[in-house]
Every structure is written in C-alpha cells, then in structure tokens.
Amino acid sequence: MFGLGRAWARRVVACAIAGCASGGVLAAGSSGSSVPSKSPARIASSVKTVSVAPSLASRTPRVVHAQTAAEARARAPGPSPQALAAVRFALEGDARGRPFAVVDKRRAQLLIYRADGRLAGITSALLGMTPGDRGYPGFTTPGGTIPIHERTTPAGRFESMPGRNHRGEAIVWFDYDSSLAIHRLRPAPAAERRPARLSSATPDDNRISLGCVVIDGDFYDLVVAPTLGRYKGLVYILPESPSAGLPWAGAAVASAL
C-alpha cells in the first residue's frame, strides 16, 4: 500500500477544498468501483446514439452519450483525427484487451473504449486550469494550495486503476503519484461555473480543475464505471502543442498531431 507523506497529505487537503479527486486508497483487487449497475431499460432511457467515424465503424458501431447534458454538448463534434490516431495505436496492440480512454485536451473531450475495442461513449470534460503538458508531483505549497502553474492535465500514456478518494467516492486514477483521476462533477464554488463550463458549446472555457478530468455524473455511472471503473486500463492524454513529444505513440499518432 502507498505511504502518505506530509506533502502528499497537504495536497489531499487542498484538493478536498477545491473539489479535486486527490487523496485516497486504491481499491483492492481489479474491480475497484462499487457503483451499482443500471438495468438495460434505464440505460436505454438515459442515453442516445449517434454515428461515428466511418474508419472505425467496424469496431465502434455506436457512441453512447449521457442524455443529461445540455443540448449544446449533444451537438459536440466526434473524435478528432488525433484522437482516432491514438485509438488506432491502442487497438493495434497497446491496449492488450484492456479498456482505455483518450483525453483530447484541444477539444476538451473524453472518449471511453471497452475492453473489446468498441467505443462506449464520448463526453466533454473539464481539465486543468493551466494549459500545459507537463505533470507535477503530488505536493503543495506550505499554505496547502496547489500553485496555479501546476494545475495542468499532463499529456502522456498512463496506466489507470479504479479506486476511491479520501471521501470514499469511486474514481479512476490515471496518475496516482500526482493525485490525478477521472471523476464526476462535484459541488464547487459558484464562481467557478463548472456545470455551465461543462455543458457549453466551446472547449475554451473548460479549464478549471486542479488537473483531474472532470465529467458529468451520469456519464461516469453509465459509461466510465462499467469500464475503467471496474478494471485496470489505459488513459492516453493528447498534448496541447503539436511540438510535444509522444514517445508512447509511435509514428501513427505523431503524424496526426
């Protein structure tokens, strides 16, 4: 099990105040999440389907979107060429039969894929307040806050694991050492306007988190919980700058960036 140093503990406090997913204990075994499953009838009434890119039609016949989002989000574009290149990299062998996710920071989108390679869903996401591809260790300033320049969602290939935060909420860790995870939208100061940012038609206002990938709660329950919320997987986070290196991606992704 992981030790909790003073610096790490300070980040737990800071994230608890700001609504981050930090501070927690990994769930035992590979199942992780205890989010109750929903019946097929309830799922059918809560989601709608749209078409996907023809190049992946044989693998991803349908895309599931949470119906609770605003209409603007329902009109969000499909996967970008860069995201599809990352998907190809995963399906060509890197995923090895595991569920995986692609975070497209330029579009502020999260794509979730099942272990069998089928696309489970796409949704908008809130990302780190500060643009940037560099990650930072899980520490804070002496006052217990995370410096603004460290509030990034780092780019890279991450091994994900279902777990729980310090409040017992089910989340998906993608960088445990930096206290970063995929988690549901939570109550936050009204001035941050997180629900409005998440449902807006533009990705330009989706930068508000401490670095975690924050999504609609229903989408988490319907799409993330049955996939990355139950099994170890992979999270590919695309860079914000085309000049950023992607040693994990190979030529397929690099050429599309």
Image (cartoon, grey):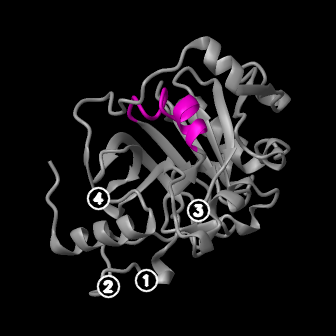
Determine which quarter of the picture holds residue 242.
Answer: bottom right
Inter-mark Cα distance, 2 to 4: 16 Å
Q: Percent x, y for residue 236? A: 55, 48
Q: Earlier in the sequence, mark 2 or mark 1?
A: 2
As rendered, which of 253 and 45 lies closer to the eye? 45
Circles 3, 4 touching at the beta carbon (< 8 Å): no
Q: Is residue 218 magenta?
A: yes
Name the element at disc 1. Answer: loop
What residue sits 65% from the left and 57% below the top?
195
Q: Earlier in the sequence, mark 2 or mark 4?
A: 4
Quick check: 41 above or below 74? Answer: above
Label 1 neighbour load within 10 Å: few <14, some 14-19, many 20+: few
Q: Earlier in the sequence, mark 3 or mark 1?
A: 3
Q: Amino acid at mark 3?
A: Leu
Q: Percent x, y for residue 205? A: 72, 68
Q: Which residue is mark 2?
A: 141
Q: Amino acid at mark 4?
A: Gly
Q: Amino acid at mark 1?
A: Pro
Circles 2, 1 touching at the beta carbon (< 8 Å): yes
What residue sits 33% from the left and 27% below the top?
31
Inter-mark Cα distance, 3 to 1: 16 Å
Name the residue at the front extreme.
Answer: 190
As rendered, which of 218 and 178 lies closer to the eye? 218
What residue sits 57% from the left and 29% below the top?
222
Inter-mark Cα distance, 2 to 1: 7 Å
Q: Which residue is mark 4?
A: 23
Q: How many marks?
A: 4
Q: Amino acid at mark 2?
A: Thr
Q: Which residue is mark 3?
A: 127
Disc assigned to residue 65: none
Inter-mark Cα distance, 3 to 2: 21 Å
